[in-house]
Each structure stands twice: as structure tokens, then as C-alpha cells.
Image (tube, helix red, strand yellow):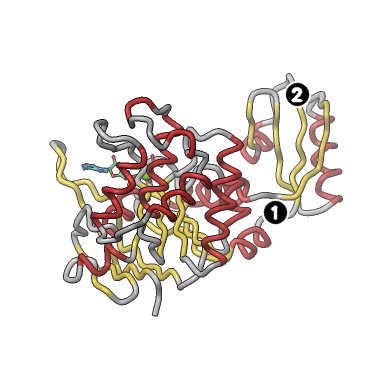
């Protein structure tokens, strides 16, 4: 039985300008014990899909089940199996950190939870903030509390909607170690993130959403293998010829071009030289998930153009 099963989920929002289709026929199963990544540009529909899973929004059509429990008809059973870290920072400003976590435990009927609450505070770098009021926390600390809140009832399925947005490097590492440990212990993880390096390192399987549709669904290793194997990276102050510019990923002075093998790299360098482009700091690296992501999104662009 899948941990999470989305079956033909569509979601349409009514807006002043008429209906807006946020999700279109999304079907995917996440198996028990998987570390699954849901990727996509802003507005692709990731949070909408998670809201439907968490029972916070209703699908226009389709079904979602959590370990066999339908999210609509068996809401309480399904909700108890999930720990959801929402993208938006929402909290009650009147309580301190420990109180917030005790209240959340009570919501799930978990009593005498202080040992686990202490472990959460410790692992999320919040031990010294246990008695601080929620109002007194920085943005990154509030997000850590949201993570702790989602985990108070030790849910078998952990759903993280951009848990590391605005979180510093050190805590990101601690958070991932902690979540990876929970995953090893058997917890299923569903993650959305714009940090593709994190997704590449952590997720065994990925779905990519674009404009509400699934445009890629595969094991991370398969997606990486299918991509161009190498990337030629260099700095330049000159403008690339149009045909190369169309292929390039450009960030300020840095340009990156995909290449299959050494021969193709030589050809690229020759074309740059012929076009009078002076290059500095030349590097060759393996294609990463960001390259795959940009390829998938660009391919879809052409189809819909
Ligand atoms: N309540 C709503 N009413 C109307 N449109 C909505 C509503 N909620 C979301 N949308 C639209 O649905 C689309 C998907 O939004 P969603 O929040 O799911 O995107 P996302 O993939 O989570 O993006 P991000 O990476 O920015 O978090 C967007 O175009 C958004 O404007
Ligand atoms: Mg979102």
C-alpha cells in the first residue's frame, strides 16, 4: 500500500478573472519509506497539492489517500498519519516554544510528550529558546518550531513544504541529518524545495510539476543519467553567439553550456573562439539536478509555445 496516493487530482480556484486551474490530473504514488521530492517553479502547484493532502483544501476532482485512508472521508485517521510543515509561517504569538509543542501534542492526543519534545528542541537547535515567546523568535527559528510542531506526534509520513527557506546553512545541515535519520528509521518523507542541491542529495525519487501538471517522475539517479553528462562553465564579458546563448545557463558573468563528451567541449570552445568570445576560469563539471530541472522546464516551454 502506498504511503500517499494521489489519484487524478485536479484543482480549480475561482478568481475574479474566472476559474484558474492550479492542478491538472496529477497522479502519483509515494511508497512507504521513500524520500520523495516534489519540485517545480513558483506557482507550479506544489503547496496546493500538499494542502489537498493535508485536508486543508479540497480537490475539484480526484482522490488522495494516506496509507489507505481517504483524506476526505477518513480525515482524522489520515491527518494523524501526517506531519506537515507548512510553507507559511503561522503560529500563536501568546505561547512560548515548549507550550506550543505541548498544545500540538494535545491536539493529537499524545500525553507526557516532554522527552520527545526535548529531543526535537535539541535536534532543531531550539533548546535555549524553549521558554521564549513565539513573538521573540527570528524568522528561521519560527520555521524550526514549525518543523518541531509537525513532528510532535511522530507521524509515519513527514511532509515538508520548503522547510529550509530562510534557514541558515548550519541548521539546514542539522535539519537534514535529523530528517534523514527519521527516514532511515522508516518514516516516509515528502519534500518540496527550491534548493535543488538538497533535493539531489536527499531524494531517491522526484516529481517535477509545471503549471499544475506532472512533467517528470523518476528516480533521481535516472534523471541525472538522462541529462547531458557534462557542463562547460566559464566567465566572460562578451556576448555569446545566438545559437550558443539559447543553450546556455547564464548568471552574471558566468555561462554554462551542456556537452556530452570531450569532443563536444572542444567544439564549443572552438565556436566561442571563432565568435571572438574571450573566456576565463574554464571548468568542466558533471551535470546536476539544476541542469536537469532547467532542461525539463525548457522542453515543456517549447511544447506549450
Ligand atoms: N486560494 C487561491 N486562489 C486562487 N489561486 C490560487 C490560490 N492558491 C493558489 N493559487 C494559485 O495556484 C497556483 C499554484 O500555487 P501554489 O501555491 O500551489 O504554488 P507552489 O508550487 O507552491 O509555488 P511556490 O514555489 O512559490 O511555493 C498559483 O498560480 C497560485 O497563484
Ligand atoms: Mg509553495
* Viewer-nearest residue: 91 or 222: 91
Q: Is residue 53 above or below residue 298?
A: below
Please state, as top left, top right, bottom left or bottom right, where the C terminus lies in the image: top left
Task: Indicate which disc residue 236 carries.
Answer: 2
Instruction: Provide residue 159's location: percent of width, then percent of height.
Output: 40, 56
Q: For mark 1, what is the residue?
A: 228
Q: Secondary structure at mark 2?
A: loop
* Viewer-nearest residue: 139 or 22: 139
* Viewer-nearest residue: 83 or 28: 83
Instruction: Please state if 2 lies on the left or on the right of 48 as rendered.
Output: right
Q: Is residue 52 above or below residue 89?
A: below
x 71%, y 46%: residue:
258
Instruction: Please state if 90 lies on the left or on the right of 270 as rendered.
Output: left
Pick whichever of labels 1 and 2 is earlier in the sequence: 1
x 75%, y 24%: residue:
236
* Viewer-nearest residue: 20 or 100: 100
Amino acid at each position: 500500500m502506498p504511503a500517499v496516493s494521489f489519484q487524478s487530482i485536479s484543482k480549480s480556484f475561482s478568481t475574479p478573472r474566472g476559474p484558474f486551474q492550479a492542478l491538472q490530473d496529477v497522479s502519483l504514488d509515494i511508497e512507504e519509506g521513500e524520500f520523495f521530492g516534489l519540485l517545480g517553479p513558483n506557482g507550479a502547484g506544489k503547496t496546493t497539492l500538499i494542502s489537498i493532502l493535508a485536508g486543508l483544501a479540497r480537490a475539484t476532482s480526484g482522490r488522495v489517500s494516506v496509507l489507505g485512508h481517504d483524506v476526505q472521508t477518513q480525515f482524522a485517521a489520515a491527518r494523524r498519519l501526517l506531519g506537515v510543515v507548512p510553507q507559511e509561517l503561522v503560529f500563536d504569538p501568546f505561547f512560548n516554544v515548549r507550550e506550543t509543542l505541548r498544545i500540538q501534542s494535545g491536539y493529537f492526543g499524545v500525553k507526557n510528550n516532554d522527552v520527545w519534545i526535548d529531543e526535537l528542541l535539541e535536534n532543531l537547535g531550539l533548546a535555549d529558546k524553549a521558554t521564549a515567546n513565539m513573538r521573540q523568535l527570528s524568522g528561521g527559528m519560527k520555521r524550526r518550531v514549525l518543523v518541531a510542531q509537525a513532528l510532535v506526534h511522530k507521524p509515519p509520513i513527514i511532509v515538508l513544504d520548503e522547510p529550509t527557506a530562510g534557514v541558515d546553512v548550519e541548521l539546514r545541515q542539522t535539519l537534514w541529518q535529523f530528517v534523514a535519520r527519521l527516514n532511515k528509521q522508516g518514516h516516509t518523507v515528502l519534500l518540496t524545495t527550491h534548493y535543488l542541491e538538497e533535493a539531489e542529495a536527499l531524494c531517491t525519487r522526484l516529481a517535477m510539476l509545471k503549471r499544475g501538471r506532472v512533467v517528470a517522475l523518476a528516480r533521481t539517479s535516472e534523471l541525472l543519467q538522462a541529462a547531458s553528462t557534462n557542463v562547460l562553465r566559464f566567465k566572460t564579458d562578451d556576448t555569446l553567439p545566438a545559437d550558443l546563448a539559447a543553450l546556455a545557463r547564464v548568471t552574471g558573468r558566468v555561462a554554462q553550456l551542456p556537452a556530452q563528451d570531450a569532443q563536444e567541449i572542444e567544439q564549443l570552445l572552438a565556436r566561442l573562439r571563432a565568435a571572438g568570445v574571450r573566456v576565463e576560469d574554464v571548468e568542466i563539471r558533471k551535470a546536476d539536478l539544476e541542469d536537469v530541472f532547467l532542461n525539463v522546464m525548457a522542453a515543456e516551454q517549447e511544447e506549450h509555445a
